[in-house]
């Protein structure tokens, strides 16, 4: 599984979930911390002006109390997705996923590391 945070100018943070790791609230909060650090380092103008917001879908982990408390404690602006809204699909549904699928179409992989390498190469071409 790939967790990816991106915006119009490219990928901000990506992380492959280790095999056997469950994406629970604690794991997602750790990943959100890494994403915040990447924004601070790679986009200091956006960080200092606090001119960025997190838009995520209705995945259960996004709604966990521990995640909501973390977002509130970090004063992160979150643009929630209305339930079952076809008009406001998460950007990965119409941007990232289809483009990644096109790049990987027709390829066969023997090991997870190979999938990860090819996926990362494909993501580099999307920006």
Image (tube, helix red, strand yellow):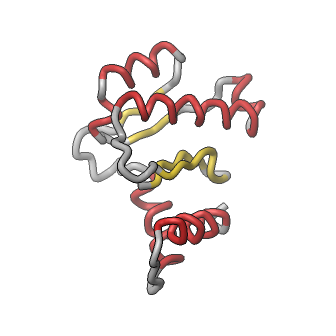
Percent x, y for residue 54? 50, 34
Percent x, y for residue 89? 36, 51
Up-down relation of residue 39 to residue 48 (above or below)? below
Percent x, y for residue 68? 37, 21
Q: Which of 120 and 54 is in front in this view?
A: 120
Q: Which of 86 and 48 is in front in this view?
A: 48
Q: Report how many numbered discs are placed on residues in the image.
A: 0
Q: Which residue is drawn at 49% across and 13% down?
A: 73
Instruction: Name the residue at the left extreme.
Output: 84
Up-down relation of residue 29 to residue 91 (above or below)? above
Q: Residue at x 47, y 66 (%)?
A: 112
Quadrant in the picture for the C terminus:
bottom right
Please indicate whether residue 41 sits to the left or right of residue 112 in the image.
Answer: right
Quadrant in the picture for the N terminus:
bottom left
Please indicate whether residue 102 sits to the left or right of residue 66 in the image.
Answer: right
Q: Residue at x 65, y 53 (%)?
A: 10
In which quadrant of the rendered view does residue 25 lie? top left
In which quadrant of the rendered view does residue 37 lie? top right
Q: Which of 87 and 25 is in front in this view?
A: 25
Percent x, y for residue 28? 43, 34
Instruction: Name the residue at the bottom extreme.
Output: 106
Q: Which residue is drawn at 35% across and 49% down?
A: 20
């Amino acid at each position: 599984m790939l967790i990816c945070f991106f915006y119009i100018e490219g990928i901000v943070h990506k992380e492959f979930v280790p095999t056997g790791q469950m994406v629970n609230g604690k794991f997602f909060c750790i990943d959100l911390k890494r994403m915040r650090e990447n924004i601070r380092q790679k986009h200091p103008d956006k960080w200092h002006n606090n001119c960025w917001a997190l838009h995520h879908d209705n995945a259960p982990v996004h709604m966990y109390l521990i995640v909501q408390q973390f977002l509130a404690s970090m004063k992160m602006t979150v643009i929630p997705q209305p339930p079952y809204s076809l008009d406001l699909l998460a950007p990965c549904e119409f941007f990232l996923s289809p483009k990644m699928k096109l790049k990987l179409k027709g390829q066969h992989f023997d090991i997870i590391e190979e999938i990860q390498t090819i996926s990362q190469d494909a993501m580099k071409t999307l920006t």
